[in-house]
Image (spheres, rainbow, N blue to C red):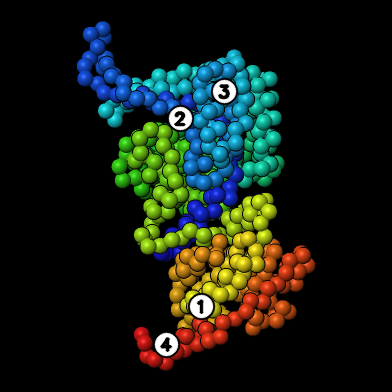
């Protein structure tokens, strides 16, 4: 597994620690399936013989559904009518434990419903039941109050605009202002042709046609897409633009960096319904886990390639993304390998559940029974164990150019497979002091060949009320001695 894949896998495995607030146009997606065997005698139209039907959350609700499917927690705010469709939508949202709904009822408007008629796998018609009228001032006020109540708990906010009237200019501007005041990352999936209403967002995710309509510029080629995006950036609309381009993949344009164009990862396209929702959900989660925009877009591109291969308004799972990461091998298990930002969120969730956290660190170059004993003792001292793993570069500085024997990716994968280990974080510094400062473990574990005053971070942990455990050592087990014996035997 290469470094990029390890990094992407670490981001994906941090999704469970993230809370995404989704605000926008809620709707019910209804699919009616059947077959066509004749043309109507009343008009030149096909007659659909209905076999089955299914309803599922759509629009902004589908973004929340995608967030939940990827293992994260979704906070959902929007407006519904006082009708049977709203009741249906509520039932479906309530059935997902990791979606927390903050819905505002407006009895004067219907709940938006998109009904798609599908014959033998081919969509033949769509019927929409909706109102696009702006919200009344009183409804806007209730919606913004619900948003304010949920916003502080969120790591990132997504504005999902389907042009159904909820994200009016006033609601959009107020939402962005609130989020910026709290320092939140703001991702907007736009529908308005006037991008100025989204000014202040962190990232805009238009498709190629939406970018073309907003700028009046051709967006046929990669160069034209980049040029149009830079016009928006120069106008101060947002900091980065991520443009979805169908079969041509995705483009990431930032003001201070070269354009990045990602080829589509889709193998076969069955249905593009809701694919943009999957993209924005994956993008938001990866950014909240500390990924760069390019990394987040790469993961979103992988997720989009998977979801368009499914029928209906589908979602993607963590396992599907991990299986489709570049060069991910069937025998590799990157789970439990986290970035520091993701590990911090994970630790916070554990503490919210009343759990104690132990921390151990080392090179773990050739894992041996002594290592397993230390890790078991560390895990036995707390409810969860985080292991800090020296990077290849830091080991070379500490032990010389012939070490490590195994790469950091290989060492992290082996450690992650150990039952007593709950999370692995690779660090590039010579000591783990930064990890200890950030994660604030309750128990700091080192081998009994150290004195407490020699253990990096011991004073910090004890000042915070934690303790230091000097784990008993197993005689006769040493990575350094093992390497020497192998070298002396002439074994290649």
Which residue is labeled 4 in the image?
Answer: 486
Quadrant of the image containing the N terminus: bottom left
Which residue is labeled 1 in the image?
Answer: 369
Which residue is labeled 2 in the image?
Answer: 56
Q: Earlier in the sequence, mark 4 or mark 2?
A: 2
Q: Earlier in the sequence, mark 1 or mark 2?
A: 2
Quadrant of res 22: top right
Of circles 1 and 2, which is in front? 1
Looking at the image, do the residues carrying marks 1 and 3 touch, with CB atoms under 8 Å apart?
no
Quadrant of res 311: top left
Q: Earlier in the sequence, mark 3 or mark 4?
A: 3
Q: CA distance from mark 1 to mark 4?
A: 17 Å
Q: Earlier in the sequence, mark 1 or mark 4?
A: 1
Q: Residue furthest top?
A: 42
Q: Earlier in the sequence, mark 1 or mark 3?
A: 3
Viewer-proximal residue, 83 or 21?
A: 83
Residue 224 screen position, x and y as percent: 41, 41
Which residue is labeled 3 in the image?
Answer: 80
Of circles 1 and 3, which is in front? 1
Asked if residue 85 shows in the view, the reply is: yes
Q: Residues within 10 Å of mark 3 (few under 14, many from 20)?
A: many
Q: Above or below — where is 380 with respect to 403?
A: above
Q: Element type at marker 4?
A: helix
Viewer-proximal residue, 428 or 257?
A: 428
Q: Element type at marker 3?
A: strand
Q: Element type at marker 1?
A: helix
Residue shown at 55%/27% (left/top)? 90
């Amino acid at each position: 597994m290469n470094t990029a894949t390890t990094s992407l896998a670490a981001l994906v495995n941090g999704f469970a620690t993230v809370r995404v607030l989704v605000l926008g146009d809620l709707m019910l997606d209804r699919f009616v399936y059947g077959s066509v065997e004749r043309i109507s005698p009343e008009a030149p139209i096909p007659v659909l013989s209905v076999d089955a039907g299914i309803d599922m959350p759509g629009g902004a609700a589908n973004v929340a559904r995608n967030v939940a499917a990827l293992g994260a927690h979704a906070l959902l705010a929007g407006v519904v009518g006082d009708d049977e469709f709203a009741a249906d939508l509520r039932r479906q949202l309530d059935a997902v434990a990791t979606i927390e709904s903050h819905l505002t009822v407006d009895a004067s408007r219907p709940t938006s419903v998109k009904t798609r008629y599908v014959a033998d796998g081919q969509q033949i018609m769509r019927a929409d039941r909706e109102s696009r009228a702006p919200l009344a001032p009183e409804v806007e006020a209730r919606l913004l109050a619900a948003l304010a109540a949920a916003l502080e708990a969120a790591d990132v906010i997504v504005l999902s605009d389907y042009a159904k009237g909820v994200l009016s200019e006033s609601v959009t501007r107020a939402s962005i202002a609130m989020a910026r005041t709290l320092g939140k990352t703001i991702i907007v999936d736009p529908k308005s042709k006037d991008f100025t209403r989204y000014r202040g967002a962190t990232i805009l995710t238009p498709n190629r046609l939406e970018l073309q309509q907003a700028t009046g510029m051709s967006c046929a080629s990669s160069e034209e897409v980049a040029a149009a995006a830079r016009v928006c950036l120069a106008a101060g609309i947002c900091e980065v633009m991520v443009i979805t381009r169908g079969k041509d993949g995705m483009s990431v344009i930032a003001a201070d960096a070269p354009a990045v164009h990602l080829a589509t990862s889709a193998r076969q396209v069955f249905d593009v319904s809701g694919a943009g929702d999957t993209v924005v959900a994956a993008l938001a989660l990866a950014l909240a886990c500390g990924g760069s925009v390019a990394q987040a877009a790469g993961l979103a591109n992988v997720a989009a390639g998977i979801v368009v291969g499914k029928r209906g308004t589908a979602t993607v799972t963590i396992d599907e993304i991990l299986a489709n990461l570049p060069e991910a091998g069937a025998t590799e298990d990157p789970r439990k390998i986290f970035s520091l930002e993701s590990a911090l969120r994970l630790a916070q969730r554990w503490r919210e559940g009343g759990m104690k956290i132990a921390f151990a660190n080392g090179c773990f170059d050739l894992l041996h029974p002594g290592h397993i004993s230390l890790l078991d003792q560390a895990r036995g001292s707390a409810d969860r164990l985080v292991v800090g793993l020296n990077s290849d570069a830091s080991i070379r500085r500490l032990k010389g150019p012939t070490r490590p024997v195994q790469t950091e990716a290989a060492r992290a994968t082996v450690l992650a497979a150990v039952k007593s280990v709950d999370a692995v974080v690779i660090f590039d510094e010579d000591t783990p002091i930064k990890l200890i400062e950030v994660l604030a473990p309750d128990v700091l574990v080192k081998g009994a060949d150290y004195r407490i005053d020699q253990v990096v971070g011991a004073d910090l942990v004890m000042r915070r009320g934690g303790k230091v455990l000097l784990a008993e050592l197993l005689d006769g087990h040493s990575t350094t001695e093992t390497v020497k014996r192998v070298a002396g035997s002439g074994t290649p």
